[in-house]
Image (cartoon, rainbow, N blue to C red):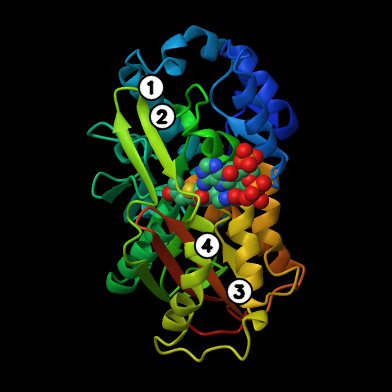
Amino acid sequence: MLAIGTANPTGMVLPQDEFVDDIFRLTNSDHLTELKQKLKRICQKTGIDKRYFHLTPESIVAHPEFFDRELPSLDARVDIVATAVPELAHSAATKAISEWGRPAIDITHLVFSTYSACQAPSADLRLASLLGLRPTVSRTILSLHGCYGGGRALNLAKQLAENNRGARVLVACCETTLVCFGRADGSNLVGHALFGDGAGVVIVGAGPFGETEHPLFEMVSATQTTIPKSDHVLGMQVSGAGVDFHLGIQVPTLIAQNIEQCLVDAFSKGVHPPCSWNDLFWAVHPGGRSILDNLDTVLNLEPEKLAASRHVLREYGNMSGATIVFVLDELRRRRKEGLLPEWGAMLAFGPGITIEAMVLRTPSPNKKW
Ligand SMILES: CC(=O)CC(=O)SCCNC(=O)CCNC(=O)[C@H](O)C(C)(C)COP(=O)(O)OP(=O)(O)OC[C@H]1O[C@@H](n2cnc3c(N)ncnc32)[C@H](O)[C@@H]1OP(=O)(O)O
């Protein structure tokens, strides 16, 4: 990984302790007192302080169909995301390209992950055009990978960079709640309490490196594991009313029960396993507070090990596939302060239940590539 950029929309920046009152008021739902109280109880447990949204109070009032499941709203949602998603990704990408120090036309591959890709051509082409990438840039769009989209895109970028000499891959992950934001009901309360909007971009390449290129993290090995018989537990479904999420109550337990084997598999692919999980730095997708709590418990992690994930969860909420890029960005800040060990583990989770695991390493400044 050679550079990282992140961005959030500023349509609404909602403190978590005001979110429920604001959303119920804006959607004329104050009479649903039991639901409101339950969503407040859940919000208090999330470990989130605030979230960013593309939607504004005005656009919520202008689109009553977003909050009435009896009315079709997919067309209106797709109209908005067609512009909003590539533009948000563009904000993150310009930061990453500026840090990388080379011109955008040196990008050879683009991998775009989003669950807002409902058209073709899609957000990847729009982003390529906003950035002025060359017409020969090799584009791939990953759709509906949900919260493991960032991990999947980075794994794919690693393969592309290692198999195409001189390749420079721009990985863009951009998720907004525009496609799913609706009236709170019994089935979507946890999603309402967790999800926010954001974009994360990483530029990936293999050596030899140019003068301006300073590797941040080396992606050493990667695995993808599907937890058997868990496909009904976590999922997304596109309907006329947008994208519905199903977040089963078993998700944190199933991840906890399977995580250690995934890590052992990732670390046995030709790299020495660490003496203890506490010898690593950790880049974990903060899918929810209890997922992080469970990992602390099953892996016996010291309290500060998941600090970057908890920081991102607190400041932004769960931005699905983009979240892992924010965690990597936070870790690279800690690395500058000399706070990271040499080896690390990256974990992202999503529908399947799929676990993307990656062994990371902080390169020494003297390393020859
Ligand atoms: C979409 C993707 O691709 C990938 C993703 O990242 S998806 C997101 C993955 N995240 C999750 O699945 C959420 C993980 N869960 C959590 O973080 C926590 O359970 C939480 C913050 C939601 C609640 O915290 P908690 O410590 O479990 O609080 P707890 O007091 O037990 O529960 C609060 C209420 O939420 C309910 N609740 C918890 N999890 C629920 C779930 N998945 N579905 C419905 N209700 C749920 C509880 O039943 C409880 O209801 P009552 O107050 O009426 O009793």
Front-lying residue, 104 or 235: 235
Compared across the picture, whether 335 is left or right of 345 comes to right
Distance Cα–Cα, label 2 vs label 3 = 35 Å
The disc label shown at residue 253, or none: 4
Q: How many residues crowd mark 3 within 10 Å: few (<14), some (14–19), many (20+)?
A: few
Q: Is residue 24 above or below residue 287?
A: above
Q: Residue at x 62, y 56 (%)?
A: 290
Q: How many residues crowd mark 4 within 10 Å: few (<14), some (14–19), many (20+)?
A: few
Q: Which-is-in-front pick, marks 2 and 3?
A: 3
* Residue ID for mark 3: 298
* Residue ID for mark 1: 77
User: Which amino acid lies under the numbered mark 2 shown in the image of this protein?
Assistant: Val
Going from the N terminus, do you reach mark 3 or mark 1 first?
A: 1
Is there a contact, CB below 8 Å, between mark 4 and mark 1? no
Going from the N terminus, do you reach mark 4 or mark 1 first?
A: 1
User: Which amino acid lies under the numbered mark 1 shown in the image of this protein?
Assistant: Arg
Q: Position of residue 12 (x, y in %)?
A: 63, 24
Outermost residue, front side: 34
Is there a contact, CB below 8 Å, between mark 1 and mark 2? yes
Front-lying residue, 313 or 172: 313
Is there a contact, CB below 8 Å, between mark 3 and mark 4? no
User: Which amino acid lies under the numbered mark 3 shown in the image of this protein?
Assistant: Val
Q: How many residues crowd mark 2 within 10 Å: few (<14), some (14–19), many (20+)?
A: many
Q: Which-is-in-front pick, marks 2 and 4?
A: 4
The disc label shown at residue 179, or none: 2
